[in-house]
Image (cartoon, helix red, strand yellow):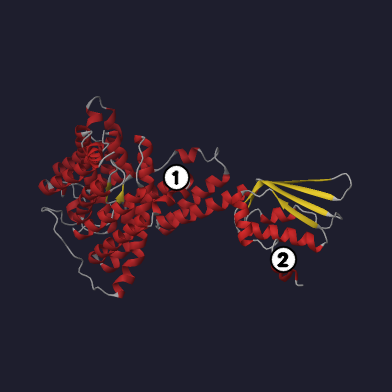
Amino acid sequence: MTFIQAVRQQWFSNIRGDLLAGLVVALALIPEAIAFSIIAGVDPRVGLYASFAIAVIIAFTGGRPGMISAATGAMALLMITLVREHGLEYLLAATLLCGVLQIGAGYLKLGHLMRFVSRSVVTGFVNALAILIFMAQLPELTNVTWHVYAMTAGGLGIIYLFPYLPKVGRVVPSPLVCILVLTALAVGLGLDIRTVGDMGDLPDTLPIFLWPQVPLNLETLLIILPYSAALAVVGLLESMMTATIVDDLTDTPSDKNRECKGQGIANIGSGLLGGMAGCAMIGQSIINVKSGGRGRLSTFSAGVFLLLLMVFVGDYLALIPMAALVAVMIMVSIGTFSWDSLRNLRKYPLSTNVVMVATVGVVVATHNLAYGVFVGVLLAAMFFANKISHFLHIASEIDSQGRLRTYRVTGQVFFSSADKFVAAFDFREAVDRVVIDLGKAHFWDITAVAALDKVVIKFRREGTEVEVRGLNEASATIVDRFGVHDKPDAVERLMGH
């Protein structure tokens, strides 16, 4: 496919569907961007500018057409401490460094590492994100009047019941209806409850270029580096996971390494325009696809429509009661959580459940999605290694004269099964010759090679002749390189002669 054909396919093959989907996504992005800004402890304009900048830039640079990227709850949760202790300027600097790290990850082709993240880790990641988003709403529901609880409950009712209305229920996003109705009620009844305007000024102009006003020295770097690294890792993890979901929904491939670079470029653009770091959004991407969005134009139009809405109707956005946003975020939390994972606890293997629950537990305890994913991947790898180590069988037979014992090894020999491999041999048996047939075995690492050396040398110490046969090409290569049983000088040193 030529460059021109690729541009036409990705940008202009679905113009009407992409534009309509972009408008729906923009309407749904407004309350989420404001809510995520509040979670991070910054003015709503920071999240809104970020969502505009990231969506527009990623439309050109991303590796997954039709995926929506903007300010997200996962990233906002990591910013709370930095904003509280050092302020907005350090957040902007951390956003720029986050982008640089993500671009570096793209050039290092770290997008391929998603192959090592199991489904149970992804499920735990999503569930933990849902729990953290819900927990972030609790301060807005603490020490408040009954009006807030009533408004929140009413908002949830609108969100979940409005889609059942014939015709209109499927056309207009129910979160938008929730916001409009609750805002009208709060203004009409003159309720004294917190509004978006109480949280900070909303943008009424286009974003402008801003260089973070922080000292350019080592101290600043040491302050922002831990946050930038966490933002980069979490942003790439959520983006890669979302890209995989959109791949499945659209039955089309994506370029994960290009997406890493694209996320980095978008975050640098966001930081330079006064926005916070962001990444791909699972919920909004699904909304986009189900609304008919397929190409890059849907992501681009979502960002443009968002900017137009916040600049020209910002005064009205300030009247939105916080209870409406709490209802929207609770809806996002409920929709994000994988309820099937609870139903499947009885059906799935214990190891799968442990990985999922551990991922959730670590994330909720540390409020860091990267830590949870690391623990989940580590546990999944350990369980996998333990499971594969059981796929090792060693049978033996002796000839009619009782002089030759043949061991036939079937399965995988590596660090986890090496001890089992050694234990299967009888070194005290009085035979003249031993044949170790490895035609159906595979040696994976130096631990396996060391186990083979140990077996051969032990037999020779007992005066038994040993023949190793049947190694496949890959196993023979690693044995020839690291093994010592066929190197007389090395063997003599090991045996102490």
Amino acid on which the number 1 mark rests in the picture: Thr
Q: Position of residue 283 (x, y in %)?
A: 32, 42
Which of the two residues, 75 or 404, is positioned nearer the viewer here?
A: 404
Q: Where is residue 86 shown, x and y percent of the image? A: 27, 68
Q: Which mark is residue 491?
A: none
Label 1 Cα crowd, 10 Å radius (few <14 / some 14-19 / many 20+): many
Residue drawn 24% across and 51% down? Answer: 54
On the image, numbered disc 1 is attached to which residue?
123
Q: Quadrant of the N terminus?
A: top left
Closest to the camera, between mark 1 and mark 2, is 2
Quadrant the C terminus occupies: bottom right
Q: Residue at x 57, y 45 (%)?
A: 350
Looking at this view, name the residue that lies furthest to the top: 166
Mark 2, residues whose alpha carbon is within 10 Å: few (<14), some, or many (≥20)? few
- The Cα–Cα distance between marks 1 and 2, rounded to whole angstroms, is 53 Å
Determine whether, in the image, residue 150 is placed left or right of residue 192: right
Q: Amino acid at mark 2?
A: Pro
The residue lying toward the viewer, choosing from 119 and 338, is: 119
Residue on which the image places disc 2: 488
Q: Which element type, helix, strand or loop, lies under badge 2?
A: helix
Task: Please state the horizontal and vertical placement of residue 13, each as a whole percent of the image.
Answer: 23, 34
Q: Is residue 231 visible?
A: no
Q: Secondary structure at mark 1?
A: helix
Does residue 289 appear anywhere in the picture? yes
